[in-house]
Amino acid sequence: MEIQLKILPHQTNCLGAICKVFEGVQISTNNPIYQNPIINLDDKQIIENIDELWVGDIDGLNPIPMNMQRRIDDGILGIDAKLETGTGKTYIYTRLMYELHKRYGFNKFILLVPSTPIKEGTRNFIEAKYSKKHFADLYSNSTLKLAVLNAQKQQKSGRKMFPSSIAEFARGSRLERNRLNVLLMSDSMLLSKKTMEKDDYDQTLYGSFTQPYNALKETRPIVIIDEPHRFRRENKAYQCILEKLNPQCIIRFGATFPNVCKTNEKDYNNPVYNLGACEAFNESLVKGVAVQTLENTNEDDVKIKLMKIISKPKSCVFRNEKTKKSQTFVVGDYLSNIDENFSGITVEAIGKTDDPDIKNGVTLSNGHVLSGGDIIFASIYGATYQELMLKQAIQNHFKQEKANFIRGHKIKTLSLFFIDSIYSYRGDENDGTLRIKLEELLSEKLREEIGEIDSSATKNPNLQQYREFLDASLCDIKKTNGGYFAEDNSKADADIQDEVEEILRDKESLISFKDEYGNWNTRRFIFSKWTLREGWDNPNVFQITKLRSSGSEISKLQEVGRGLRLPVDEYGNRISTEQFYLTYLVDFSEKSFADYLVNEINADVHTTSIKEMLSKVAKERNISENILFAQLLTNEFVDRDLNIVPGKRDEMMNQFPEFNTGLQQGKVIDTTKGKNSTVKIRTKRFSELKELWSKINQKYYLKLDIVPEEELLNCVNDILDKDIYEKQMVYAKESRTEKGDNKIEIKEAIAGYHTLNDTMPYNEFLKRIHKATGLPLQMIHQGLVVKNKQKTLPKDFFNIATLYKFIEMFQEWLETAFMKRFSYQKLGVNSKETALTDLDGNVKDCIVQGAIGIMKDDSLTVPSKFLFDSFVYDSPKERETIEKSNIDEVVVFGKIPRKSIQVPLYFGGTTSPDFMYILKKRSGDYVVNFIVETKDVKKQSNLRGEEKMRIESAKVFFKAMRDDGLNISFEKQLKSDDIVRMIKKLVG
């Protein structure tokens, strides 16, 4: 299997934002060829570009929130990009290096990461065949040469050899125009005095440098930092970057940024892109999260709290929360001294810990690290509770695995377990008690699943294949699971090294069902300490189980981050058209995990208060503010000051979704509280819709009319005649104080400008237009020749500004020229598996709520003719439509699952309608299929240009179906359109 990389809009937007910073900036190449081109850091264009990005003056980019707009002048250009975990940071910064090389000639990049798992993940991505192929297609003239700095091994000859990775990186020069040089290292290697500070190597670089730090500093690198919260400004690693590497630019990518020292203010430095957690969840760029908590089996459970850590003498104080008695412990003391339920656990260390989030804490003998204020429960450490957690995790896994396997395109399902005690899994001979218990429970569950398939009347081929997979798992139960722990790196056991290799470095193998010889690869249960909680991730992790509480109050988003990425199928395709959930199983001590997670996701969003929104929502509902306030108060959703009553938020947002400006409902659910991520499909209602559903799921392809070559050439000539030539200008702005009316005013003026002569080769100019437009190279060339004969083109005509202008004007022509010149043709390919049916064409029991609607109102009666058993919708207009649709003329109706009926658009992308109806006359002698696209705007003129084109495309699409014999009508529904009137008009 080979993973298929796709170009995603949010990733392209991030790239564009960072590259915009350098646009029009003076960049010089009058320096040694082994250095990067030199950025004029005093060029005011840099700040002007960043200010443009901050206010949102760039198409496709949202403004940067005011609370993030911060810059630090430390002599180095800092650029920050905030991207939520699972949205593709590694892809973006890898492609960014190619893009900066292509646009500006930069060819020396140092990638800094905070841990070995992240380093291995980054290296594997960059070196993977699928990545190389993808970037070769995008940047055919560029080759990325990756050097990885690892710990140096002693040379047998006794010679002190300069680190080869640094030498290779440093020697790369601009003479190799197609090569960009990248050095990847962890913070520990950056700070390694043994490797980096030595100056007695038997080699020199550039004829004079014998110390790695000096050699790297001389290259004038651009430094890219992954996980900036692990590189705080006050840390040694960051100070080392500034002093020893002296980069021209530091670009930081992360979901979490550190606080400014001893403040609550975030340490942002020129942030230019902000994809926060709320947007990532709401736009379905990541999985949703379903939190499960296993209740406490012991009502009289003992819990103890770490009250104090004392440095001299080293000791700590625990308090029994039941008896309120405190006791002091030193290293080696047993916790059973405070309560016998903690038998066998000792205090192993006090002070510095191995947990990067806990600088000063207490490490227990089972590996659990505690910080001041942490509470631990006795029963969590008991074998009975641990076994129940394992049983629940296995039950969750097989439910998800079966659903993922019997699809048309299978998905391999992984479960990740976080543990504190490495010994409990590895034991002495890779046979820890936890592993033995897991394999025992697995064997039992596998036999149960195989028995169910054997007794089933269903003969689904995929189900029979799943039986083979389960049988292979049972035959070699040890191969079903594996672990990665930092200590594994020093072990020689071949089986352990195989596990580590597959988990840490071979993502493709881990998510493949079979190996290269056709044998089943059954490994899907992964165990690790907190080592893997950052950097490593896998798209097919569908469950994370915490068999021990984390101890530290680290970000909840970081905890779930290992499984947020959208899954890939057996062919390596990323699946973005469905709502998937990551199950997060925690013990009872973290029963509020879901609430904490939602609060953290909403923390970065400016949530407008209820008081601020009252007038707007009242207007939308056509009622007075007083009546709306009374409704909120009567339902006990708010207090008299319009603050939301604790615990009432979800219920209020169900009934008044207009107030929700944060995380959408259904993205994070707490299954322990009875919340469900699915809605049931009513079988009887589906039977009435079945024929229509089957017809609208038939595959159609978009057919564009052939445009005569003469017309295309006229298009090229027209674009060139519109004087698309643009000089790249750099302006100097001057701010001066002037006396006004009894006050001093600051006025800005242009103090001067400079022309940037940054051209590109003619063949590259042609190729980039061809790639963006599809126009034949010869035709573009022909048009330019004609234009040049009419009037000689300026010497700097072939620059980036002119290129973008041409592409922009061609896109405008395309959207207009093809408005009436496209059609849809049936492919003749029918698939029984759809959003509502399985491989055999049978209706599914349920569907993920997010695929139907982000809101759910349990206070409303579900219309009897509605396809689903719950009242789910996406907007107030949809809510109204569902309420009113239970009329005599309607046989059945339902929301069309999101992205399930994808109408291809002639200008790129797809669109999907909202509702489907079966209608009849009162006499019952006439039946019509009705498709509705709902737009929550008041009138036609409020529709954006692209929305109008989407609706026109859908009209043509469903007309093609009607021409093929399906009695179907399509209509758009605006806010002013009443669904009852629309239906009655249609059926007469």
Image: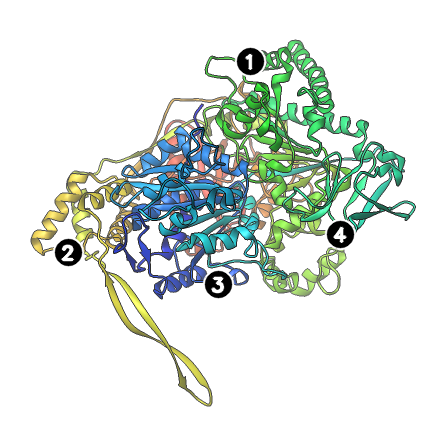
Sequence-wise, the earlier of marks 3 and 2 is 3
Judged from this view, the residue extending furthest toward the left is 789
- Location of residue 13 in the rendering, given as x and y in whole percent from the top left corner: 41, 49
Question: Disc 2 versus disc 1: distance between alpha carbons?
Answer: 65 Å
Give the SS element for disc 2. loop
Judged from this view, the residue extending furthest toward the front is 158
At label 1, the amino acid type is: Gln
At label 4, the amino acid type is: Ser
Res 630 → quadrant: bottom right
Question: Disc 3 versus disc 2: distance between alpha carbons?
Answer: 39 Å
- Location of residue 403 in the rendering, given as x and y in whole percent from the top left corner: 59, 24
Do we see residue 783 in this rendering?
yes
Question: Disc 4 versus disc 1: distance between alpha carbons?
Answer: 60 Å
The residue indicated by pointer 3 is 72
The residue indicated by pointer 2 is 795
Towards the viewer: 372 or 753:
372
Question: In the picture provided, is 459 more to the left or to the right than 271?
Answer: right
* Badge 4: residue crowd in 10 Å (few <14, some 14–19, many ≥20): few
Give the SS element for disc 4. loop
Q: Nearer the viewer, mark 2 or mark 1?
A: 2
Give the SS element for disc 3. loop
Towards the viewer: 571 or 752:
752
The residue indicated by pointer 4 is 311
* Badge 1: residue crowd in 10 Å (few <14, some 14–19, many ≥20): few
Q: Which mark is residue 507?
A: none
Question: Disc 3 versus disc 4: distance between alpha carbons?
Answer: 36 Å
